[in-house]
Image (cartoon, rainbow, N blue to C red):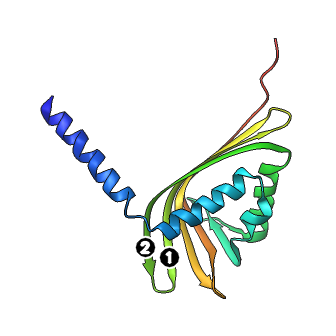
Amino acid sequence: MHRLLFVLCAALSAAFAFAGSVPKEWTARYAALDQALKARDTAKFESYLDSSFVSVDSKGAETSRDDFIKMIDEIFNGAAKAAPSVKISSVKSEGDTTNVAFDFHLKVTRSDGSWTAVHEVGTDSWKKIDGDWKLVKTVDKAMKMTNGKPKKKK
């Protein structure tokens, strides 16, 4: 019992220590992305994407920026509420690119009661372009999207 408690405390301590190691610049950037999604401001969200942006799914299939934006717009079509959350697990700079590993959840509820839930785990690659950080690539380890219908009234 004491050993289990010790292991649990050690794991929690490591998790809290690691959580504090994410640079504030990146937690602020992802908070701004979440805020744009929560406000259902897809234009603001899309402004973070570079013109060269590409999304790569877990099987290696690529989606262009234009097709990615169409997908985002479809998810948010008729949205009455959006509840995003993201946990950043690491930030690593390599040359002119900063890679941010994340675990993202989103639930969008539409005015008709239908909803879409997204769970995505992956890595975003950012580059500073003309003085602004732009998202140039997202590589997913896993992504699940679930659609639901409104509950029937009795």
* Vertical side of 10 occupied by 126: above or below: below
Q: Examine the image and state in which quarter residue 47 appears.
A: bottom right
User: Do labels 1 and 2 touch, CB within 8 Å?
Assistant: yes
Identify the disc placed on residue 47: none
**Disc 1 from disc 2: Cα separation:** 6 Å
- Badge 1 amino acid: Thr
- SS label for mark 1: strand
Point 71% across, 54% down: residue: 37
- SS label for mark 2: strand
Mark earlier in primary sequence (1, 2) = 2
How many numbered discs? 2
Depth check: 102 or 55 in front? 102
- The percent coordinates of residue 22 (x first, y second) are 42, 64
Point 55% across, 64% down: residue: 28
The residue tagged 1 is: 98
- The percent coordinates of residue 145 (x first, y second) are 66, 45
Q: Quadrant where the N terminus lies? A: top left
- The percent coordinates of residue 132 (x first, y second) are 64, 81
* Vertical side of 49 occupied by 153: above or below: above
Q: Examine the image and state in which quarter residue 41 appears.
A: bottom right
Name the side, left or right, on which 125 lies relative to 19: right
Identify the disc placed on residue 92: 2
Residue 49 visible: yes
Residue lying at the far top in this picture: please name it. Answer: 154
* Vertical side of 2 occupied by 48: above or below: below
Name the side, left or right, on which 1 lies relative to 64: left
Depth check: 36 or 144 in front? 36
**Other residues around mark 1 within 10 Å, as few (<14) / some (14–19) / many (≥20):** some
- The percent coordinates of residue 48 (x first, y second) are 69, 71
Point 81% across, 11% down: residue: 154
- Badge 2 amino acid: Lys
